[in-house]
Image (tube, rainbow, N blue to C red):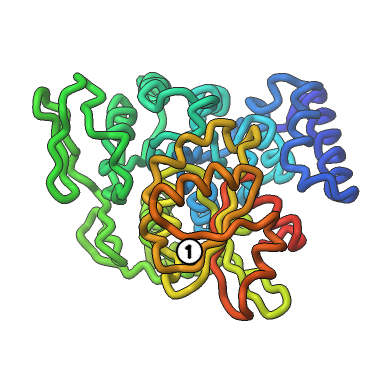
Amino acid sequence: MSQLPFRAQVASALGRTAATLSRMTGRGDGSVIGGRVGLVLEPDLLRKLAQDRKLVLVSATNGKTTTTRLITSALLELGEVATNAFGANMPAGHVSALSQAKRAPYGVLEVDEKYLPDVLDTTGASVLCLMNLSRDQMDRAAEIWLLAQKWRRAVAGKPVHVVANCDDPLVTWAASTAGQVIWVAAGQRWKEDSWCCPECGGPLDRKDSDWACRECTFRRPQPHWVLDHDMAIDPRGQRWRLDIQLPGQANRANAVMALAVVEIFGVPVQRALPKLAEVRSVAGRYTTVERDGRHARLLLAKNPAGWLEAFDVTDPALPIILAVNAQGPDGRDTSWLWDVDYRILRGRPVFVTGERKLDLALRLDTAGVPFQLAGDFTEALAAQPPGRVDVIANYTAFQHIRTEFGRAE
């Protein structure tokens, strides 16, 4: 890699120092503050740090952090990889990640959906992984059709290799202006945001995984990669069992997207799969924490699509704790709770906590789901009998629980 200009070297070094101090003082993991310091000293630092690296940008409403981790794990076969492993997915987090691994020839960066066009333009990344788009933080991110349109404009005419989920019509529309696209049939369980054609506004006809517009030529492209239950089918038609540790169909979708990405870099499936199987938890997701004989498995769900996937991996025989906040990173608007079908929880002991527990309680009551309110997570956990319990929390509620258990990984 070429030498950074002197000013960029100083900005990067001071950013790393700030990140180290943040970790040492227990104020955070340093994944944001270091980048902020660096960008104040050198506003063009991200562009300079990205030069001469082979970069992958990963964006979606759900699954960004996990897919970033899976791609990183497989790319380590080729050498050092810079990555924002803890989900700091805006430019400050990207600067911090690239500064911390300043000699890494590869980089895998999770990118917030809203920031993707700017980050792609700034970094000149060679590979872009686009997985899904659904409603999320509407008070901050705006209408998802507008996001898809921004993505579509961002990839048009760029020399970027796009890996895109062709089962999501919005992602397909966004990616279809790119010069090179690898289509992956990774599935789409949540369909409530894509019943209309993004090209002409007409109705989309769906049959199984296929979809097509009734009024124009927009339709699902022929996939190169296919997720078939627990098997990945590669572009040559060979089937590979996705024997991974992460639970649920959503994570198998993340895995097949990762396989498609790393093959672009020359990592074949047979070398990548064992590396994907090493990933057991991602920034606390799917981790089990223990207190007084109670073993709580932590699941993150930030929006209706995420709750649907979280329900898929919970155990119906176990009690469940639900925690919802509405701080800035969560989005202040909790009206999305009404888009989640909570009836699946009927018959389970349900405990509700978090800053917006009353919002969630009203939603559960309307769905006919009995529940108990708890003042905080500690009280909710103490109310459980010894044994296993599932926990679903949105972003800041999840991070508070992780902090309580020493930033469980």
Q: In which quarter of the image is residue 403?
A: bottom right
Residue at the image point whose x is 72% and y is 62% from the top: 378
Q: Where is residue 186 in the image (x, y as percent from the top left)?
A: 31, 51
Q: In which quarter of the image is residue 30?
A: top right
Q: Which of 293 and 309 is in front in this view?
A: 293
In the rendered view, would you say 117 is above or below 63? Answer: above
Please tell me whether mark 1 sits on a helix, a strand or a loop: helix
Q: Where is residue 261 in the image (x, y as percent from the top left)?
A: 41, 48
Residue at the image point whose x is 76% and y is 48% from the top: 29
Q: Disc 1 marks which residue?
A: 276
Q: In this view, does 269 lie to the left or right of 214?
A: right
Q: What is the quadrant of the C terminus in the image?
A: bottom right
Residue at the image point whose x is 27% and y is 52% from the top: 225
Dot 1 amino acid type: Leu
Q: Nearer the viewer, residue 4 or 154?
A: 154
Q: What is the quadrant of the N terminus in the image?
A: top right
Residue at the image point whose x is 83% and y is 49% from the top: 23
Q: Where is residue 189 in the image (x, y as percent from the top left)?
A: 31, 50
Q: Which of 18 and 400 is in front in this view?
A: 400
